Image (cartoon, grey):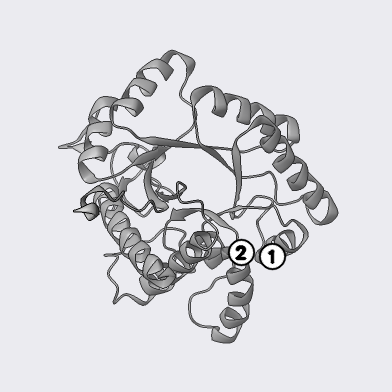
Amino acid sequence: MADQFKLSPIHPKLDIQQSWWAMSGVGTDGREWSLEEKFEKLAEAGFTGIHAAIPPEQEQEKWRRLLDYYDFSFGTGGFPGSVKELEEDADKAVAFGATYISSQVRDSLVIGDEAVSLLRDMNKAAADIGIAHFVETHRGRITQDLLRTSGYVDALPELRLTIDFSHYVLAGEMDGFLPDYEFKAQMHLNKLLSRTSCIHGRISNGQQIQIDSEYNEEDPLVQLFASWWRQGMVYWLSSADPYASLPFVCELGPTPYGIGTPNNHGPRQDDATSRWNQSLKLMKLAKYQWKKAIANQI
């Protein structure tokens, strides 16, 4: 009888967020879904949050109402090149109710001690304002190079990362033709995974930043990226608060970021496949890796 009154154990959660960028142009029969329809579709599909820029002031009340109605989390990002710009991003994020900022810190020409100092000061500024701050592994940014980012992790014990290894697979042309190189790179990738605080879901083949895939476990590329995501989850779980959530963002960009097909409507191409269906497959894959990561903790 006493067992009936036991409280359910509290565990960290996986927060499957959809990138609002990935929802650009998404709809049915050639018509893009409205804001309200997009929220409804995301909730029906099983997403638990959204990653987006802070909405324009005139739209914030509507966004906040929808986020609250569907009980969605909200994470945001930015492109700060200075502590002041990060502080501005953080103030806006806190005011709107975002739970974290994932920064693509500018730019790839800031290196060495200057980069370490900037990242340290940004982290302190975000902590002082009271919001979690993660730095995204992204080409063309301060984290452009795998080796330099590995050095940042060594120099900054407080540095937390948004893991998106599609950028390093592309920038390093990790396409399977140089297995010795990729084996050596894995040591540094694993070091970065130990600082996982957010994961962006995208798969690169070393030649294209974002490929179309069925996201099944038999695909070697899927196996590779899934193993990274799972290892990042395991690291994160090892020190996570029971009430914490790990954001996994399905981030499939529209063309020309993704693969497109020619059309007669101007320079922008149509998507070669459905980003919506691909996002649903990414979500399913992420949930499966989470279960495996949880099992690793037991």
List the residue tagged with mark 1. 150
Viewer-nearest residue: 263 or 248 = 248
Helix, strand or loop under label 2: helix
**In this orientation, does residue 56 appear?**
yes
Amino acid carrying mark 1 in the image: Ser
Helix, strand or loop under label 1: helix
* Left or right side of 68 for 82: right
Contact, mark 2 vs mark 1 (Cβ under 8 Å)? yes
Q: Where is residue 144 in the image (x, y as percent from the top left)?
A: 65, 57
Viewer-nearest residue: 168 or 13 = 13
Q: How many labels does the image show?
A: 2
Vertical placement of 30 versus 184: above or below? Answer: above
Q: Where is residue 3 in the image (x, y as percent from the top left)?
A: 23, 55
Amino acid carrying mark 2 in the image: Leu
* Left or right side of 62 for 192: right
- The single residue placed furthest to the bottom in the displayed view is 180
Residue located 20% across and 40% down the image = 44
* Left or right side of 120 for 144: left
- Label 1: few (<14), some (14–19) or many (≥20) C-alpha neighbours in 10 Å: some
